[in-house]
Amino acid sequence: MKFINKKLKNEVEKENTKQEDVSPMGQNVPNRNVPNWTLIVILLIGMLIRIVGIADMPNAFNCDEASAGYEAFSILKYGIDRNGNKLPAFLVAWGGGQNALLSYLMIPFIMIFGLNELSVRLPMAILGCVSLFIVYFLLKKISNKKLATIGLAFFAICPWHIIKSRWGLESNLFPDLILIFTYLLVKGLEDKNRISYYLAFAVAGISAYSYGTSYYFLPVFLIPLLIILIKKQKINIKQAIISILIVGIVSLPVILYVVINTLDLPQINLPFVTIPKLEVNRYKELTSMFSGEFFSSSWENFTDSIGILITQNDSLPWNNIEPFGTIYLFSTVFTIIGIVNGFKKKKWIDVKYNYIFNIWFIVSIILTFICNPNINRLNIIMFPIIYYTVIGIYLVANKYKKLAIGILALYIISFGLFMYKYCTQDCNEFGNFEADLEEVVQYIDKIENKKIYVTDEIQATYMQLLFYSQYDTRDYIKTMKCEDEHAAFKNVLSFGKYYIVDMDDIELTDGNVYVIKKFEKEKLDLENCEIKEFERYFVIEK
């Protein structure tokens, strides 16, 4: 981060070496320096809204966050995940798998802050802040300072990126890693820096550990890109081969994971890594390639994906906040302008390496045919959309200068309203989130020599219990009982002193402890019971 700040300071203080800027009309106009304070203010706003208060907002904890965090805790403390695999390249997790990269990134923060919401959410928040710098330096590298500043300002207040930066969903690492890949690639090519160039492909290889869609995206994206770079004489065939080898070597455990689970081969257990064999292959579930109705489901996936991209809404309230969408609904006009400019032969503004974003966009569209869509699963297309939107804003603001202030005001007002709604929403109402459980679990964890029955109304009950109690993974593996060990999502019934139950089927008996949500109180006969009240729960001792 110190290096990035130093680089930014050098960028904003030195005289802009580009003396001309291409206007939308194709005329050369003077390139105006953006004041240093403008960049600093934009960056500060962008970083603050991505990182301040992340432990408390979202105000509820997602079950996938709890899972990734507990896996990181288990690997740190015991060297195994909750399924007993030593240093896994991919997490078995719920049964159908979970990407491992974010869990490994959490480990240093768990060492410092302990296992809690802050340590789970910090890696994504920090990456979100780093992406602010990457966006600015990338756009400046391929265009000019004015466009880079507009791009940074738009990206800083982009709803999609703000939301995803503030909670720990492992799949949301993927687009930012490809953004970093793009910057390092462009820097390597422009500066003739081989270290930066090859480091870009190492980052591409690392991205394979972040999300299952990378298994399809990376080869279809990288191979055409390398062919075009060879054709444009940016690299030679030898460099292209080395690039592919770097990606292959770095992502080899993931490649082996895909092979093992596709061909039904046995699990690989090595002293330094485990390549797991899953009961159900998760990436098959995420895509329709292995469906018996491939063509019909592919078309449905595509049309659903286009609908989500146009409406900026997947009906999942944790992914977007109505009526703002992913990039603000009115931004669609600018996106279309940017797409037209990106693909037309005679462009209104020439941007170096525009073809990288075009390939990225096209491959992302192809991916929609094989991906059951929501905004998280379509996340790889978001940076090309942001790029085209920024180009559109730049073109309109340059050509119709009187509109520029109006556009700025519209975004500022929309951003303010978005942040108000984001900060005041109750995420406990969302299906996969639970709030105010930490104090409850820490209380019941201290109770000894009693069975503790916990309502299954809590989302992913066992995972929340494991996380907040920091339960010994070895004891969990020994005592865990589930409904079906071969299911894609294991329904854990009990472990240790904890029993997960439907309170409709329970009669309170002496010597036991019960944890219920407040609305369940009316279901039970609480005569002669001791009741401890929490924010959203009751702990009942008979």
Image (cartoon, rainbow, N blue to C red):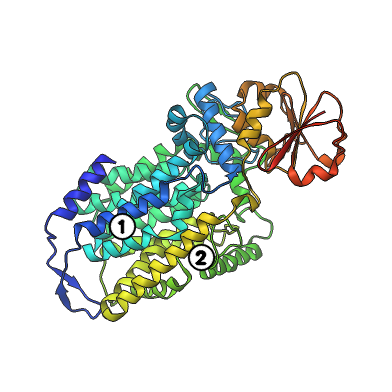
The residue to which callout 1 is attached is 42
Q: CA distance from mark 1 to mark 2?
A: 21 Å
Q: As shown in the figure, which amino acid type bears the numbered disc 2? A: Gly
Q: As shown in the figure, which amino acid type bears the numbered disc 1? A: Ile
x, y percent for residue 204: 39, 46
Horizontal side of residue 18 vs 262, given as left or right: left
Badge 2 element: loop
Residue 245 visible? no
The residue to which callout 2 is attached is 325
Q: Is residue 377 above or below residue 409?
A: above
What crowding class fits label 2: few (fewer than 14 Cα within 10 Å), some (14-19), or many (20 or more)? many
Nearest-to-viewer mark from 1 and 2: 1
x, y percent for residue 418: 48, 62
Horizontal side of residue 417 vs 145, given as left or right: right
Dot label at residue 402:
none
Q: Nearer the viewer, residue 21 or 365?
A: 21
Q: State which quarter of the image contains the C terminus.
A: top right
Horizontal side of residue 252 vs 146, given as left or right: right
Which residue is painted at 47% across and 24% down in the image? 272
x, y percent for residue 284: 61, 49
Q: Nearer the viewer, residue 211 or 415?
A: 415
Write down the quadrant of residue 396 in the picture. bottom left
Which residue is painted at 31% across and 57% down in the image? 42
Horizontal side of residue 122 vs 533, given as left or right: left
Residue 72 visible? yes
x, y percent for residue 79: 52, 23
Which residue is painted at 39% across and 73% down in the image? 334
Badge 1 element: helix
Write down the quadrant of residue 322 in the picture. bottom right
Which residue is painted at 30% across and 71% down in the image? 394
